[in-house]
């Protein structure tokens, strides 16, 4: 017959086993769903918990951390009937463990297929040039559509990024030729602009040179005219003084004037490039003598004739 002490020990051991079976420790970053007789009852947060053995059990262990899902490469026909291949990545996070467990059968597969179908829809409504130049727009449209679709599942789509868009090889070669042509066009335009600017600067320089040369000729002509004017004034003044001296009976002025002109004339003959033979008095005494002779002639002209002394014969009656 089993004693009371033995029964107590067995009961204690069974109780300890049941308690240990009901102890649940949830790791950080995870949520556990609890089911009672197959029905969801509650969600266990990270930490220490106790559930009722045999009546309650852990339904699923859901990671609440943000995860990354690769979108495999697939072919997409664009709006202008170009065939491209595209792939991407999806960043998502479970916000409600119960909904992610019981609202969708396979969360990963659902997100994958939803993203792939919407990727074809969004990219198929755009031209090839838009696909290659507006990735941010594609990412934004995909994020809005997929995030709205996954909200009933308790999932938050944080980001969708297109990794690669691969056009056909012939389109890539055509784009390369087009880019080369555009660059050559810009280079030719820059060369033409540079040549045009150089021609403008050269014309401006020539214009300024002509203007400065004309200004120089104008200044030189003005100074030459001024010099000739002063020379003429000096010549006129000298002629006036000589004339006044002659009128006043002073022969020295006319001597100086004639001698100066005589010497200037001799200088012109000496500097003449023509070969000639001139016989003229080159000695100083000859010049002075010639000047003196002309002075005597002028003196005789300027002196009035004197009356002849003696009686004037009377005419016969």
Image: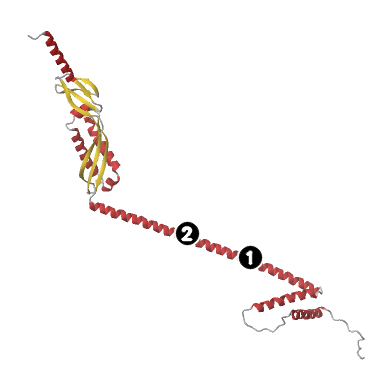
Relative depth, front residue between 118 and 62: 62
Report the label total. Answer: 2
Q: Position of residue 57 (x, y in %)?
A: 16, 22
Q: Position of residue 24 (x, y in %)?
A: 20, 22
Q: Is residue 181 left or right of residue 259?
A: left
Q: Position of residue 34 (x, y in %)?
A: 18, 23
Q: Is residue 291 above or below residue 189?
A: below
| Residue identified by numbered label 1 | 223
Sequence-wise first label, 2 or 1: 2
Disc 1 element: helix
The N terminus - image quarter: top left
The C terminus - image quarter: bottom right
Q: Is residue 252 above or below residue 143?
A: below
Which of the 4 image quadrants contains residue 29? top left
Q: Is residue 244 above or below residue 172?
A: below
Type of colouring? secondary structure
Residue at screen point 17% across, 16% down: 16
Question: Does the CB distance between marks 2 and 1 fall below 8 Å?
Answer: no
Residue at screen point 20% across, 25% down: 33
Which of the 4 image quadrants contains residue 25? top left
Residue at screen point 23% across, 27% down: 30
Q: Is residue 280 left or right of residue 200?
A: right
Distance, label 2 to label 1, CA atoms, is: 32 Å
Q: Is residue 36 left or right of residue 227?
A: left
| Residue identified by numbered label 2 | 201
Farthest residue to the bottom: give it: 316
Disc 2 element: helix
Which of the 4 image quadrants contains residue 298? bottom right
Mark 1 Cα shell of 10 Å, populated few (<14), some (14-19), many (≥20): few
Relative depth, front residue between 66 and 178: 66
């Amino acid at each position: 017959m089993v004693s009371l002490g033995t029964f107590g020990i067995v009961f204690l051991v069974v109780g300890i086993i049941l308690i240990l079976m009901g102890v649940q420790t949830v790791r950080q970053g995870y949520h556990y769903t609890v089911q009672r007789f197959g029905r969801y009852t509650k969600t266990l947060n990270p930490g220490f918990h106790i559930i009722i053995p045999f009546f309650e059990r852990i339904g699923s262990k859901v990671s609440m951390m943000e995860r990354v899902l690769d979108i495999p490469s697939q072919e997409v026909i664009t709006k202008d009937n170009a065939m491209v291949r595209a792939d991407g990545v999806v960043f998502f996070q479970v916000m409600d463990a119960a909904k992610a467990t019981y609202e969708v059968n396979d969360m990963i597969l659902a997100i994958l297929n939803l993203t792939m179908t919407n990727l074809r829809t969004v990219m198929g409504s755009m031209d090839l040039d838009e696909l290659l130049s507006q990735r941010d727009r594609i990412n934004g449209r995909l994020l809005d559509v997929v995030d709205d679709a996954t909200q009933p599942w308790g999932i938050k789509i944080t980001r969708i990024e297109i990794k690669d868009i691969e056009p056909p090889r012939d389109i890539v070669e055509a784009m390369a030729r087009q880019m080369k042509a555009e660059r050559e066009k810009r280079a030719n335009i820059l060369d033409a602009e540079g040549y045009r600017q150089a021609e403008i600067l050269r014309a401006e320089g020539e214009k300024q040179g002509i203007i400065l040369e004309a200004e120089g000729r104008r200044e030189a002509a003005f100074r030459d005219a001024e010099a000739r004017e002063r020379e003429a004034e000096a010549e006129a003044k000298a002629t006036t003084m000589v004339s006044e001296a002659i009128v006043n009976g002073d022969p020295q002025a006319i001597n100086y004037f004639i001698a100066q002109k005589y010497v200037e004339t001799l200088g012109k003959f000496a500097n003449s490039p023509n070969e000639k033979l001139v016989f003229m008095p080159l000695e100083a005494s000859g010049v002075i003598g010639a000047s003196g002779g002309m002075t005597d002639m002028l003196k005789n002209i300027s002196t009035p004739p004197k009356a002849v002394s003696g009686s004037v014969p009377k005419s016969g009656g």
